[in-house]
Image (cartoon, rainbow, N blue to C red):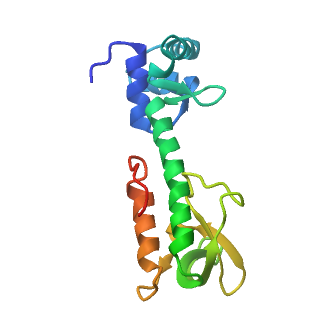
Amino acid sequence: MIIRTLLDACWYVLETQGEAQSCYWLATIMLEMKLWRASESRFRKTLDSDIVNHGELSKFVKVGDDEYALRCWTARRIGSSETLLAYHGYLAANLTFPFRARYDKRIGRFEWGKMPLDVTGLLRPDECEIAEEYGIIATGQDAEESVDFPLDEVEVKESSPSCRLVRDYARWFHNGRGTDTTRPH
């Protein structure tokens, strides 16, 4: 990619970093990369101007008081959230509860261990926020307490009827959710 403008430089850095950034951070990192030299206020003015002048056609979107992201990310996230909700409905209807599984649990200050767990259900979307970061939240009981956890973090026994559904969901959640617009069958 040839970088000819400040907007080209912003696109390149945001695409490389993969997350929303502040104008201060953009100015600092671009100076360190010897990519572009501009003040924080110049970045803000340039990005805000592009968003106002091009509207929905702008490559950028303001996501906070002073953070900017690529518009294509927000489109992916909206699609992912809708698909995540559809997947929740599919799993809630097709998983057989309760089922046995194992999950990582903190057992000491710096130590984690695999703990057996009975997965008893999925939290409803109105009980928790189904977010891209954690995905679908399940609930269950280990030997000590009731726990809520991301469904993709459990290991289900091969013999369980729920094994394939949970593994397929975990694979989708980790590998394809950013671009997958299909709904589960």
Q: Position of residue 153 (x, y in %)?
A: 52, 69
Q: Nearer the viewer, residue 140 or 55?
A: 55
Residue at image coords 42%, 47%: 178
Q: Nearer the viewer, residue 31 or 147?
A: 147
Residue at image coords 41%, 29%: 13
Q: Position of residue 1 (x, y in %)?
A: 27, 24
Query: In the visual, does 140 lie left or right of 37?
Result: right
Relative height, residue 129 to residue 110 (above, below)? above
Relative height, residue 102 to residue 43 (above, below)? below
User: Which image quarter: residue 125?
Assistant: bottom right
Residue at image coords 48%, 44%: 79
Relative height, residue 70 to residue 130 (above, below)? above
User: Which image quarter: residue 150?
Assistant: bottom right
Q: Nearer the viewer, residue 84 or 46?
A: 84
Q: How many marks?
A: 0
Q: Nearer the viewer, residue 64 or 25?
A: 64
Query: In the visual, does 41 lie left or right of 54?
Result: right
Relative height, residue 124 to residue 177 (above, below)? below
Q: Quadrant of the C terminus?
A: bottom left
Q: Position of residue 105 (x, y in %)?
A: 60, 75
Q: Position of residue 119 (x, y in %)?
A: 60, 79
